[in-house]
Image (cartoon, helix red, strand yellow):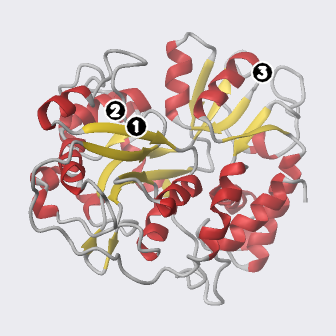
Amino acid sequence: MKSIKRAFISVLAVAALTGTALADMKKEIGPGEGQVNIVAWPGYIERGETDKNYDWVTDFEKKTSCKVNIKTAGTSDEMVALMNEGGFDLVTASGDASLRLISGKRVQPVNVDLIPSWKTVDERLQNAPWHTVDGMHYGVPYQWGANVLAYNTNVFKEAPKSWSVVFEEQNLPDGKSNKGRIQAFDGPIYIADAALYLMKHKPELGIKDPYELTEDQYKAALDLLRAQRKLVGRYWHDAFIQIDDFKNEGVAASSSWPFQVNLLVADKQPIASTVPEEGATGWADTTMMHSEAANPNCAYMWLEHSINPKLQGDLAAWFGSVPAVMAACKGNSLLTDTGCDTNGLGNFEKIKFWRTPVSKCASQAAGCVPYYRWVSDYIAVLGGR
């Protein structure tokens, strides 16, 4: 919740998605400055400290003499707040942050001609609308995947078929109530998860896109979340705290990332995950450069490094995500040749990828509720209002 409040003021100032980045696009890469400072999701930039098999930082530092400094963030709003504060060169932004960063002039256009491996990026991602504005790229695709339903296999002998186990009060298969045994994501973009659930269970609402909600549709999503508030044991944004909660606090089910599930399974915990019948929201993350990056040369070197097939495959194996470079799906001993399929390669068209809600929307002629309302109203939901 602190991360949401921290970003609240900055989000209000970026309600409309207009404008361009401050910095002009670089034309050449000079000598490295000696370091690069990156805001990243947990597990996205590893140097072998958790598991020596997963290290895509050490070799980069040796080759470039650019020391990698990492600041992890648990929500997109926290990432936006950190980029607004400055002091960072790069951020691994999801789609619900990337356009805000562009419109807020916090990131600069990226010259893909200075990134030799750009041509290897999945064509579905190269011109994706969450990082491409007026034909100009503001980042390099990194990884993508679904927000999964993680569950305790001692409670669920079979995978839950519906997100109802976290949205509606009920007895779980072990005969006990789900009250106090579920979690939900500590970020206003989670309103889209409620909207996605309502698309199937209340079709009369006419929701066509979980990020494009009329006032009535939005109210229905908030009502669902207010009811869920009575069931939630914790709103999570720290991946490692959620891991501990599954291990020690009796969590039965929650929205989660494949990252937590992978680590829990590796620790031999009774945890599995699924994408229920309603589908899932998801993330397609882009590495973006701050408009006032102090270390742009090292930053460009990292952008090129970030899409080499070895890193892409290792990261996908570690996080449970899908690479932005399809060559990573073959020949990687950690990911294996079936890893991309296991991590959801075939789900691209089924995922409702995170993006920032705006008032002028395509699916609703009357307009939609903009993101600054999502922020303030989700804070109210978390506060029991």
Q: Is residue 297 left or right of residue 289?
A: left
Q: Quadrant of residue 184?
A: top right
Label 1 belongs to which residue? Answer: 44
> Disc 1 and disc 2: Cα gap in Å?
7 Å
Return the disc, 1 or 2, that comes first in the chain's sequence.
1
Residue bearing mark 2: 315
Q: Quadrant of residue 5?
A: bottom right
Residue 365 visible, this angle? yes
Q: Nearer the viewer, residue 64 or 109?
A: 64
* Residue at the bottom extreme, as displayed: 366
Q: Earlier in the sequence, mark 2 or mark 3?
A: 3
Mark 3 vs mark 1: which is more N-terminal? 1
Are dots 1 and 2 in contact, CB under 8 Å?
yes
Q: Which residue is mark 3?
A: 249
x and y, in percent, of residue 288 in the image: 34, 58
The circle drawn on residue 59 is none
Residue at the spot x=9%, y=53% of the render? 116
> Which element carries disc 1, helix, strand or loop?
loop
Question: Camera-side residue: 49 or 65?
Answer: 65
